[in-house]
Image (tube, rainbow, N blue to C red):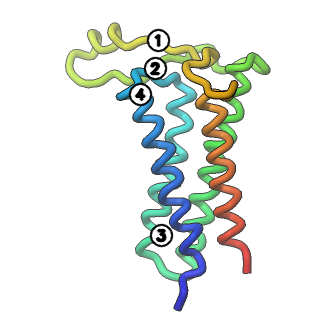
Amino acid sequence: MVDRLRPAHLLLLLGPSALLGGAFAFQHIGGLHPCEMCIWQRWPHAIALSLASLALFVPGMGKRALLVLAALAELVTAGIGVFHAGVEQRWWQGPTACSASDLGSGDFLSNVMATPVVQCDQIAWSLAGISMAGYNAIFSGLIAGVALWLILKR
């Protein structure tokens, strides 16, 4: 029997993995520390990836439900990305206290003092006029939309 959910399942495993991997690469290899809203965008990816991974072990309607929830998590991160991109473009105001949360290990106070403060309304990187938050919104929205279409089509 052919698993009709397989394409959506693969998309919901690979998409959030790639976006999280890219975010961590920009942070740890590229030296671009995340702001608070950047961190917010990572959590729904982790949730989507966890749900899609759990769906590997669940048959039938349970699998479909987990994949729908994973796709909805991707919609959440797309929404946060749209909000963050709007803050970066000064279309609306973001959170007043927005700083990096990478504290590392060791002496807490030393790590806090050494951690750069990153403002949510500053664009750290962009390509073709689109920031990382904008790309997250675009790619996450596409992943969610295509996955939901694949899951719900008959």
Count residues near mark 3 (Cα–Cα under 10 Å), then give few for <14, some for 14-19, many for 20+.
many
Looking at the rendered structure, the secondary structure element under dot 3 is: helix
| Amino acid identity at mark 1 | Val
Q: Position of residue 104 (x, y in %)?
A: 29, 24
- The residues bearing labels 3 and 1 have C-alpha atoms spaced at a distance of 38 Å
Looking at this view, name the residue that lies furthest to the left: 106
Q: Nearer the viewer, mark 3 or mark 4?
A: 4
Q: Which residue is mark 4?
A: 27
Q: Which residue is mark 2?
A: 100
Please tell me which of labels 2 and 1 falls first in the chain.
2
| Circle 4/circle 1 CB separation < 8 Å | no
Residue 21 position (above or below residue 107):
below
| Amino acid identity at mark 3 | Ala
Side of 100 where 132 appears, left or right: right
Q: Which residue is mark 3?
A: 55
- The residues bearing labels 4 and 1 have C-alpha atoms spaced at a distance of 14 Å
| Amino acid identity at mark 4 | Gln
